Image: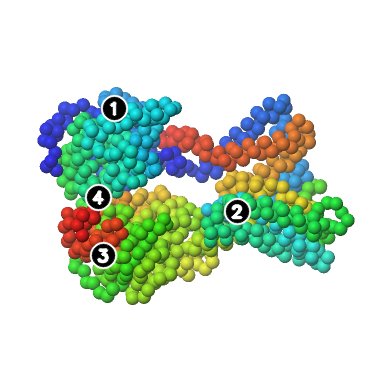
Amino acid sequence: MSTASVPLPAWINYGLIPLLNLFLAFFFSGLVVWAIGESPFEALKLLLAGALGRGEGIGFTLFYATSFIFTGLSVAVAIHAGLFNIGSEGQAYLGGLGAALVALSLDRYVPWYVTMPFAIIGSALFGAACAAVPAWLQAKRGSHIVITTIMFNFIVSSLMNYILVRVLIVPGKMAPESRTFLEGGQLPKLDWLIGMFGGRLGAAPLNFSFLIALVMCFLVWLLIWRTKLGYEMRTLGHSPTAASYAGMRYARIVMITMLISGGLAGMMALNPVMGASARLQIEFVGGAGFVGIAVSLMGRNHPAGIILAALLFGVLYQGGAELSFDMPTITRDMIVVIQGLVILFAGALEYMLRPAIVRVYQQISGK
Amino acid sequence: MTGKAPHLSLDLSKNEPAIELVGIDKKFGAVHANKNINLTVAKGSIHGIIGENGAGKSTLMSILYGFYQADQGEIRISGKPVTIRDSQAAIAAGIGMVHQHFMLVENFTVLENVMLGAEGGQLLRQGVSSARKELKRLEDDYGLDVDPDAVIEELPVGRQQRVEILKALYRGAEILILDEPTGVLTPAEADHLFKVLKVLRDQGKTIILITHKLREIMAITDTVSVMRRGEIVATRKTTETTVEELAELMVGRRVLLRVEKGDANPGKVLLSVKNLTVKDSRGVTMVDDVSFDVRAGEIVGIAGVAGNGQSELLEAIAGIRKPASGEILLDGKPTAGADPAELRELGLAHIPEDRHHMGLVLKFEEYENSILGYHRESRFGGAMLNLDEIRKQAEEQIAKYDIRPPNPRLKTANFSGGNQQKIVVAREIERNPDVLIIGQPTRGVDIGAIEFIHKRIIEMRDAGKAVLLVSVELDEIRSLSDRILVMFAGKVVGEQSGEANEQALGLMMAGIAA
């Protein structure tokens, strides 16, 4: 009979509480900025202007958000079935190999729109393959998926090192990366999207995979709330005993869920590999898989929420980069601190304010 | 109850009040959980509070114990107004609570549990010896005999409950609130609890007993208040009321307390259990070589104290738990290896004991639960869910089973216990199964819904279905069953006809006579 069981209206749950958490995160970030002797307001202004001020900034923000949407969806799908997939990072990394192999083999012969469907499938397959072993170990052997997916991040990291240094490297070059894809292996930039709002994309790498991400949001929503498979996944996620009572097959649901989750993580690679750098580079995921956990958490595991949370983190990434450029005392590491505070308040301490808000709400509405 | 001291009922009016609730009012949004509650409980008395689920008993007690704050009104303890912000304040005011589900650390000893939260200082040792002395004194004073060094998980439930009471007394409770205390006890253990409560009362403690069992109210309380829809609709001296009157006050209409049913017409054997042995996840044998048949058109009841293998038996028949050995036959066909989904297709329906974890997904909306286990049926769609069809049949069930509020989009957790159970019962019975297995059909369910569910079960029998019923409520087993099997320590230790006498059953349940 604690405040946790008191229902709150949706606008408080999904609107007010996240906003207050965000406000707290920015407040404490402000304190940190102030403590190193800079003006918090100036910093906030620079951050927002850098992320949203010009067409190019928006392009970068959306580019980062695209990656976070994919990994956020990956984490969310698993969470709906009660599985905590920490391995999106590795799955995305291996997904990059899938996308790159397709691009490397097709880019000479066909235009990008022919390559793209194969690249989507290739990246998803490789991402799913990376999730398959932990999923099988969880389903059949009861090995905890959190542990196994973390370990697979390391395995994939070593494997990709080997492949890039020994196999895909361009002979005679020093950089551990594949050759640059030709036009047929690149996803087109979305100049027209920014152009519609009168901006200019400039050097920003916003590309077609942003639209793929939005389509995936819709498909994930459809899967979770409109299909029988999604129904079984949610049953398992809420109550494993109810799922077994209803005759749902645990191993089957765990396997399918993790393959989908890994597939979504794998597709993240389309964005940096085929959309931005047009080659497979070492460590291209750059922590997007882990950000996906925070994005999913903040977005309450709902595609709509994930889009919003991914945009927020996109703003932090892009705005943060601009900020550290304009304010040299605020280093790249400071930006990580600010991101950490956002994750702390909006993700981990999600329910910190709730009891107080419930009390206020009861006082206002109870009379 | 004749055993009550006659002077007490005289004393009550003279005794100063231990607790006074004046104009307590509490709203949750649109729900008016407590409306202007006025209640006075005399010191040194046992006061019963009965009411259906959702009548506001729990809210009222939660206000008293500091889980909620009242919107209006005042609480007075021994005449002095107090503000109870949390359970700490409640304890300081001398209020102790014995919860329905025990709040004990299973692998701690009795002494450690009693001290928990009242250790007195950073170093444990000083506290331990004084706590031991104090515990001994309490045990002697109130006849609550428990070994202080026994580990909780090794104690029978009745003893564990005594530890809960000792915990409250150790913290200086003058007023004890007991929430459905007999739900987990054998009849003998319940009798012993009542003796303890009487001793406590005679020593001047005040006891508030929340229960849905009218018999207990009649047996032990001095005064009783009936709650309905957030209000106290009547307060009576127990000697001056009857079970029938109380039941009517609770529900607001006349209630049939006895189940009316005709004779059984048993047909062919539909469910047959042969030499079934079931082990739990630790490998402990929970069902030990059990055999019985259930025929078409009869209700077979399984009586027994909770934890004697009934749950595992049901789960094995339902295909949730794999038996270690033995056979289960549905209409003569062995079901070995069939999972719950396949068994449903063979005509087996299962109303599980634990609706919160098994029968329902509480976070789902009502209509989502109305297909749980049957969601594969083609009329609910192929790969996609046919939401129109699902909601339509959910609405039909809601109408037919009078599930309230009649809203298939409401989250299941927000239905009362009785209505949640009706959701399960509707889902399982509406598929028209040949064999129905039922665990605790009316646990935590209000009287009105109990009557309704019992009628549906009898109807199933009369329609020629085989019904297997497991319940720890002896009254329920006796009034519904055509035959009664008693389980003790995993074995069927006896069989009785439906008119079995309660004492004989009680002895078998305790494993004394076989």
Side of A282 where B273 appears, left or right: left
Where residue A266 appears, as percent x and y from the top left, is 68, 57
**Residue that numbered label 3 is attached to:** B300
Query: Looking at numbered disc 3 in the image, what kind of residue is underneath it?
Result: Val
Q: CA distance from mark 3 to mark 2?
A: 48 Å
Query: Looking at numbered disc 1 in the image, what kind of residue is underneath it?
Result: Ile
- The mark that comes first in sequence, 3 or 1, is 1
**Residue that numbered label 2 is attached to:** A148
Question: Exactly how many numbered labels are in the figure?
Answer: 4
Q: Is residue B249 above or below residue B90?
A: below
Q: Is residue B178 visible?
A: no
Residue located farthest toward the top when viewing the structure as drawn: B80
- The mark that comes first in sequence, 3 or 4, is 4
Q: Determine contact: label 3, label 4, CB under 8 Å.
A: no
Side of A243 where B470 appears, left or right: left
Query: Tag 1, which secondary structure?
Result: strand
Q: Residues within 10 Å of mark 2 (few under 14, many from 20)?
A: some
Q: Camera-side residue: B258 or B273?
A: B273
